[in-house]
Amino acid sequence: MSRIVMKFGGTSVANVERIRNVAQHVKREVEAGHEVAVVVSAMAGATNQLVAWTREASPMHDAREYDAIVSSGEQVTAGLLAIALQAIGVPARSFQGWQIPLRTDGAHGSARIASIEGDALISRMTDGQVPVIAGFQGIAPDNRIATLGRGGSDTSAVAVAAAVGADRCDIYTDVDGVYTTDPRIVPQARRLDRIAFEEMLEMASLGAKVLQVRSVEMAMVHKVRVFVRSSFDAPDAPQTGPGGLPPGTLICDEDEIVEQQVVTGIAYTKDEAQITLRRVEDRPGVAAGVFGPLAEASINVDMIVQNISEDGKTTDITFTLPTSDQARAIEILNAKKAEIGFAGLNTQADACKVSVIGIGMRSHAGVAAQAFQALAQRGVNIRAITTSEIKISVLIDSAYAELAVRTLHSLYGLDKA
Amino acid sequence: MSRIVMKFGGTSVANVERIRNVAQHVKREVEAGHEVAVVVSAMAGATNQLVAWTREASPMHDAREYDAIVSSGEQVTAGLLAIALQAIGVPARSFQGWQIPLRTDGAHGSARIASIEGDALISRMTDGQVPVIAGFQGIAPDNRIATLGRGGSDTSAVAVAAAVGADRCDIYTDVDGVYTTDPRIVPQARRLDRIAFEEMLEMASLGAKVLQVRSVEMAMVHKVRVFVRSSFDAPDAPQTGPGGLPPGTLICDEDEIVEQQVVTGIAYTKDEAQITLRRVEDRPGVAAGVFGPLAEASINVDMIVQNISEDGKTTDITFTLPTSDQARAIEILNAKKAEIGFAGLNTQADACKVSVIGIGMRSHAGVAAQAFQALAQRGVNIRAITTSEIKISVLIDSAYAELAVRTLHSLYGLDKA
């Protein structure tokens, strides 16, 4: 017997018929003898409708009211699934965030989970009941509902799994697992049976949009094994994959991954713009002078590369950011030009960041060199490079994005046979 | 300065544009210097959609889950109105039932209000904020949301008014007040400026569907003055009716009604069926033997008339009930025939109850006799009669309903000039 948290996203619960299908998935696990809790998103489209009404009421709105309104979507799904489960003989009850309670900080609209009281959920589960939890929401210190930001239901599910000491958190989604890269670009992409938390974190933040980054962070911190699987499988399909699981990807501690590959996957992010500040005075605090004003304007800077300038005395700073923020960032930097002290500013849009990810890199030399060589052979010009222990990222022209991803995917032996 | 509770029903908040219009009504009262709390229903149609989903999930559903689902409608409206108020400079925040808290009994789906904590609301109001309260809901002893049954938002509003010691509870609805009778039947019907609680209770339960009966009961018990007015008036229309109020009807203590008429209004209920049990043994407990089994089957019996039988030794019992329950009631009674002890059962559908209502009747003799005479002159046959201190009801053939209502309306001088 295992204790399992099952999470279903908006498309899986888009209407009552699909909710009844979800109930069958839950029943299967209960009948297999597991203790089960379920976390649900709002019915697909419901959140968008609620957000649209909120904006129509006022473009500038109180985040606390936004939360009270938008959280109702998950509340409805949780109640409907509890009813659908009861109807097929599975004892169930819905829980809203404030009823658990799942406590958050006070950042309404994009709150972070502070704590979860697991006792009520555990006692239901050991009694043979299925708690059905409204995802994406909790209760803030002001005793009002707080939402976790879009996609927060994944985070809810992992946090619930940690709180009840679940053996696994199953995320049912519209893809059947995590792939070595985007299968739309590389048809030879393979589904990974397992991937380490750290790798998934890089994959998630780099554009493999299977899971919200925060949910992976939380899974890593609390060592919650997360299993990504398709919600389109028939509830009665045989569960005969590796480890008695159906097709899918287990995100787990690297210790659980027996045959570690050097490279696990290739990720990419498009629509990046690049800004280079030339001949920045090389003194302490200069990076803060550049990035502080951008952070204040809520501009998310991604890659940062600092290099010595041509003149050998000053420094060149290059960084990337979403293309949509490019104009605003340039305006801010030019306004601060004297204060920061730089000679010139170059910028380029249409950049793409391609990343090679793998825990195995830590113990293998030459991985980066291989990548640079392969890209050079294909005529892909590299604008900037950053590396970490388990990742190599290169910034290239967007036009070469697909070519670069395919080249690297083959290079590291990730293509399926 | 007064303290006012304003209540807006589903059609008044059917979309965001109308919610913004409601915000203007609230702003007007705030700018007039009043302390204001608002109670809202779900957007028209929202509750029906939620109920439909619940039924689709399972025709037999857990009332606690039903409540969690359906209560979300009012939650959304309350948040949207709070945002709309803030947008026009009126400080506001939404409250859900559990946040106040508004406590109910455990009868999920049709709960009754047990208590309301007024402190949080009062402190907001004295601070110049407008609490916007989700109607129709509270929190049950099991710490789960309970709804008050359809139309419960009126009851919420009156209960909130009582809890905060409001001077008045304004019910904005799709009619502009309470009329002497149904204007669709009698075009000469007049809007009443004032009506006593007891009279309104009879009018409400007899088919003048302006207010839910329970809300009138609660208003009477807690002496909450209720003002019924149209939600279609422009927010900036002059408020120049009697007592500085716009057109509408004030439901209040009879002491406040200076010129009391003998008869205040004529109400009617259609679709009544009549059942007569002939020659029932005249012994203690016989009425309980008849009506106990019907109550157990949730059949609402209305008029009850007991009379001595032809034989002078037994009794005839006549009562009315909704036509939809007629067949079921007959089945139940026939099954208990030996136990109850009656000789025969007559029944008739297509009955209509017409009632003459007025507190003034208490001090005026002959009101009933006038009615019987007027109806006889028009050829209206009376099947049964019941009377109370402030009401005379007659049961007649449905075909004569409109004629009877018009006749009585004229008879007591209620037609407008």
Image (cartoon, coloured by chain):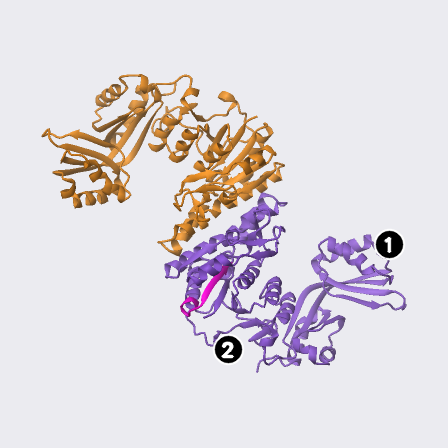
Chain colours: A purple, B orange
Quadrant of residue B277 within the rendered picture: top left
Q: CA distance from mark 2 to mark 1?
A: 61 Å
Quadrant of residue B346 within the rendered picture: top left
Q: Quadrant of the N terminus of chain B?
A: top right
Residue A133 drawn above or below residue B2: below
Q: Indicate which disc residue A338 carries.
A: 1
Q: Are marks 2 and 1 in contact (CB under 8 Å)?
A: no
Q: Is residue A191 visible?
A: no
In reply to whether residue B39 is colored magenta, the answer given is no
Q: Please name the residue that numbered disc 2 is placed on.
A: A242
Q: Where is residue B22 shown, x and y percent of the image?
A: 53, 36
Chain under disc 1? A
Q: Quadrant of the C terminus of chain B?
A: top left
> Which residue appears at 34% of the width and 33% of the height?
B205
> Which residue appears at 24% of the width and 19% of the height?
B369
Chain under disc 2? A
Residue B398 drawn above or below residue A215: above
Local SS, label 2: helix
User: Which is more N-terminal, label 1 or label 2?
Assistant: 2
Q: For the magenta stretch, what is the residue range?
A: A29-40
B297 sits left or right of B97 in the view: left
Residue type, label 2: Pro
What is the count of numbered marks? 2
Q: Is residue B79 visible?
A: yes
Q: Residue furthest bottom?
A: A417
